[in-house]
Amino acid sequence: MYKYDTHVHTSESSACASISGANQARLYKKLGYTGIIITDHFFNGNSTVPRRLPWEERVERFTLGYEHALEEGQKIGLSVLFGWEESFCGTDFLVYGLDKQWLLKNPDIMNWDIPEHYRRIQEVGGLFVHAHPFRNADYIPEIRLFPEYEDAVEIVNAGNQLPIFNQKAKEYAKKKNKPVTGGSDAHHATSVHVGMKFDYVLKDIHDFIHCVKMRKNYTIIPMEESI
């Protein structure tokens, strides 16, 4: 089995993170992971990127954490894939399967609501995952669920402070018959690490998406096996 973390932040792009992309890559390699997906906070979340900048520069800065992790990963033999985390008034979604060029071509993305995001991401074969849907935190005014506008549900998130948040996510995904993912939501070197185990090495982000959508060739790493 090959371990991947699908929810990883970097200090270059996520204001609440304290570890750089390169250091994340080195840490995960040391922990025995095959790969990671960098999912920094987008501009509607806790981003380091100033809003006053031109769109192209914002995107260039946003992808720095991923690019630094990728560069280091290529040196040490760790697969590094790209995604990001969107926030809609505290309701968070993980986006997979799109790239920097797609972002550069869609400067109006900040005007899209959740249904529009879902539609646009579906059009290009991406994956829209509801992150930690039952987390209770100061920055989340209310729990909002969008079963008709999500491809999968993150049922294990090591950043959740109480086990009940993950348990409710599992129950929700089962009730709505949704594919599931798991990730660390890692912001620091001291973060607790979980993720997903795959039967084979993923060749790219689309391989990851295929496995999740088809609900095969992977298992979720439970909190009991966190490191």
Image (cartoon, rainbow, N blue to C red):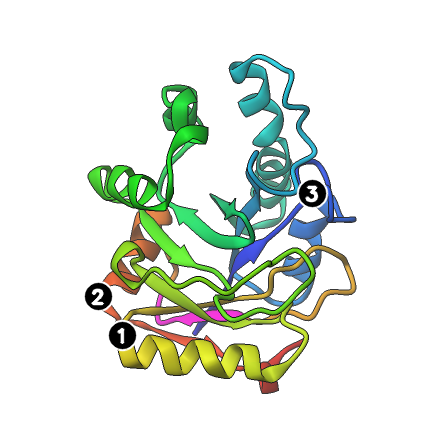
User: In screen coordinates, is 120 left or right of 53?
Assistant: left
Q: Quadrant of the C terminus?
A: bottom right
Task: Tell me the SS state at disc 2.
Answer: helix
Residue occupying the point 49% across, 83% down: 167
Q: Which mark is residue 176?
A: 1
Residue type (three-letter) at the residue carrying disc 3: Ala
Mark 1 or 2, which is nearer the eye?
1
- Residue 204 seen: no
Task: Tell me the SS state at disc 1.
Answer: helix
Task: Tell me the SS state at disc 3.
Answer: helix
The crowding category of the residue bearing disc 2, from other C-alpha atoms within 10 Å (few below 14, some 14 to 19, many at least 20), is few
Is residue 206 shown above or below 58?
below
Q: Which residues are magenta?
A: 195-200
Question: x, y (%) of residue 128?
Answer: 35, 51
Residue occupying the point 32% across, 51% down: 127
Q: Which mark is residue 22?
A: 3
Residue occupying the point 35% across, 43% down: 97
- Front residue of this view, candidates 73 and 184: 184
Residue type (three-letter) at the residue carrying disc 1: Lys
Disc 2 target residue: 214
- Residue 178 seen: yes
